[in-house]
Image: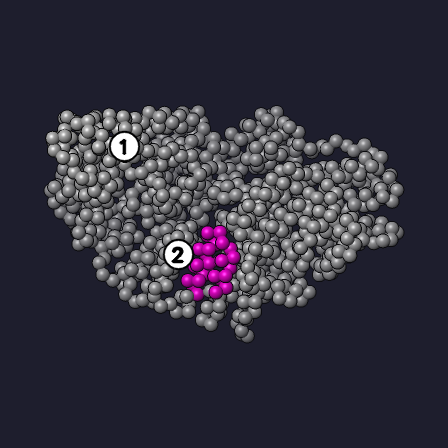
Amino acid sequence: MDELFGRDEECSRLTAVLDDARRGMSGVLVLRGGPGSGKSALLDHLHVTAAADFEIMRFDAVESEAELGFAALHQLLRPHLSRLSKLPDPQGDALCQVFGLQERTSPPDRFLVALAALGLMAARSDDRPLLCLVDDAQWLDGESAAVLAFVARRLHADSITMVFSARDQIHCVDHLAGLPEMAVVGLRAEAAGHLLESVVSGALDPDVRGRIVASTGGSPLALIEAARELNADQLSGEAPLPEPIPLGRALERVYLREVLALPPQTRTLLLTSAADPTSDPNVLWRAGPKLGFDVGAAAAAEERFLLSIREIVKFRHPLIRSAVYYGAPLARRARVHAALAEVAADLGAIDLRAWHLAAAATDPDDDVAAELDRAAVRTRDRGDWTGSSSFLSRAASLTADQSTRARLLLKAAEASVMAGAPGRAQALLDEAAVHRLDRLSNGLAQRARARVHRLTGAPAAATDALLSAARELGTVDLRLARDILVEALVQAQISGSLAPQGASRRGVAEAARSLPLPAGMPATTGDVVLEADTAVHLEGLAGAGPLLKQAIKAVRHEESTAPELFQWLAAACSHATILGDDVTLHELARRLHTEATRQGAVIPLALALSHTALSELIAGHITESERLFDQRAALEEARGSQQDLGALLVAAWRGRFEEARALTEAVREHVARTGQGYQLVFLDYARCVVELSRCRYNEAYLSLEGQIGDTSQVKFALVDMVEAAARSGRRDEALDVLEELSRLTDRTPVPGLLGDLARARALTTPDPSSAEPLYRLAVRHHEDARGPLRLARSHQLYGEWLRRERRPKDARRELRTAYELFDEMGAQGHAARTAQELSAAGATPPRAANAPGRGDQLTPQEARVAHLAAGGATNGEIAAQLYVSVHTVDYHLRKVFRKLDIHSRRELADRRDRITSA
């Protein structure tokens, strides 16, 4: 190809990517460069090179399709839906819903759609390697861009290669950011000159050649098109060159002049092709009789290489399509769109019909606006939030009534938020603000702004906007206002200690108190949750305890179909933590996890994994906690984010102190960047765990010094604070925390807290004769508590006390029990502390059975796969939990077996508690 002159290096790299796929490995590459730099030619080269031994998916994006959600996914995946049976049901159902093959009452989760796309592409590569090419990715619709970028990030051991071409500084850059890139820049002067010579049939003056190369910057397309545009005299130097040489917009005018020289029927065919976002030849030929052209009209355009008509209609370059469409008078474009609307109606494409009707409208038209509004609902139900927003914003532009227009713009903004497009949402909100908004609309606008802030990682600003929305709506729709306050509660909790004054949970409580539920209005579960949270922040736990329990009970009895269930369950988990009720926390977290998994709801699933993992951690089920935290980390990684808090907590309990120190800095940086202040308290708790296991009691106390209080989320650590204070000579502080723990246990007399209270009293009593019965009482209560951690700690501290009381034999008995429990759960930090005490008591400490050996050191992803496989999960189940393909799971398992020198899953299960990552 002429366009590949001087591209040997780029072609070699592309060939290497294909060779990786032939060897069973995946490859991803984004070609970046300006228009006309040769990106499309490189994709064409790749297409031809791979045709013999690759299954090829290709999509050439065009600007007009950028507002049609999932357009690229339709073209890439629809031919392969026969393999849907290989996907888990939730994923297959989500993809069917997107393609209009299944109807549901709520939109599909985009994350499930992305997992389905990954699974379908992996299944398609079973027979032979798969090559997915996406040209002009800057024009991808937002939904397809997000899904394809997700797939690209999750490929590992699949025979799949994905290559995108994209211009710089275009909206989809955010989706492709971080993927491997190759810059496609202008050719060097010598190569550019050779390319120019190859396309000029006559004489080419050296000075002319130099000027053209310099003017085009070595752009292959610009070189080729300049050679076509300039006449023989200009190229030979006998006539002056035009100034400037046609480039960019000037090149569009060149194309337009070429189009205007064509017969009228051909020009109409070109305009129809440019106006049709489906690029379907069938649509083109159906529109022909309505617009006065037939198949013969294509000949003149094809002879000039303006477009080709095969399986799809394709322009030689997007600039040609742009020149044809925008160079046509408005009246002609409207006529073409009206004809295409009739074709869409004949084909049953009612949403596409609405889109063309809108493009054909030149004046406000309430009937078309109503049709667009209905289309927005249908596209929303298929999960196409981008398309829904586009329909609504166009409906607004065709609506004469100002209040209706504002309402439609607000709905469009909300849809853009759901599409993950905060910039577009803010622009729509700004447009809506031009119109006079009533209190209801203004409140809804504030809620939409809050969700924009949430998307951009500003939870405090989101809380502030939600409070403004609730205040605005309080006099016109109290029920909606109070529901918004529950949403504000969640955002304020995320901000935690970083919440500014007025946007904290107390600020939400004050707003709720100013918007009381009137007599006679039935209270919803949301109202009960809000009242309980309000009471605890304004009146303290003493008065709020019964309300918190009432709220938890109400959430327990809610139906799984309640739309607000996830929000309520999240609040109830927080309430159980405030009450120190580890049993109820575990129950609620498990339900949140079950419901989120069943419904495929990603954000609630992330929250559920955090709550469930924490519940397992404080119980001492560290391996299970690590598995859940790993799943949360994998989920965040798949979404292009990062979550290190779980890894920090596990590292602290595992006794991996250097790793914990490094992760502490990573968490601090993440908190500073995102404003997620809630993580800071758990960061401090991790530090407390590390310091206690190293017997650094003063540092342990200081790490949690500010975390005492009614709304503390670390009530399970109160007994640790008593220990740290008592053993660092802070008796008064120890007694203060003991009093706090005593009041909490009176309200929540669960075995865990009852044992904590007995152990704390043993630690603080000055009378040795009183201490021993209290330690024994702590052990008895903790034998009934969830998990072994509290029991191990009570045996540990009892044994340490016995040694200090010069009773080494009794001390060795308790310390051996503690050591065995710590070792079995993998809490190596406290196992090491206990081993030191055993040595001091005259015993030879046993070697840790579960201390990881060097051969067990796996990568984090290998460890995740190994844990799940050891627990009995199939490869398909592991793939679904870690958001990768089955091929990738199989690849990691082979490496795990080799590193651990094992040959079966049974052997892997036997070593489950020794699995760790490097």
Three-letter amino acid code of the residue under disc 1: Gly
Residue 223 forms part of the magenta stretch: no
Residue under numbered circle 1 = 218
x and y, in percent, of residue 135 in the image: 32, 37
Q: Residue at x 81, y 32 (%)?
A: 844
Looking at the image, which is closer to me, 53 or 577?
577
Report the side of 273 relative to 563 (left or right): left
Residue under numbered circle 2 = 426
Q: Residue at x 72, y 42 (%)?
A: 693
Looking at the image, which is closer to me, 232 or 293?
232
Looking at the image, which is closer to me, 827 or 160?
827
**Residue 865 visible:** no
* Label 2 residue SS: helix
Q: Residue at x 46, y 52 (%)?
A: 455
**Disc nearest the viewer among 1 and 2:** 1
Q: Residue at x 41, y 66 (%)?
A: 442
Looking at the image, which is closer to me, 719 or 358?
719
Report the side of 156 relative to 824 (left or right): left
Crowding at mark 1 (Cα within 10 Å: few <14, some 14-19, many 20+): many
Seen in the picture, residue 856 relative to 386 is either above or below; the reply is above
Residues in magenta, as a range: 443-468
Quadrant assignment, res 206: top left
Applied colour scheme: one colour
x and y, in percent, of residue 348 in the image: 28, 50
Predominant SS along the magenta part: helix
Quadrant assignment, res 918: top right
Residue occupying the far front of the picture: 207
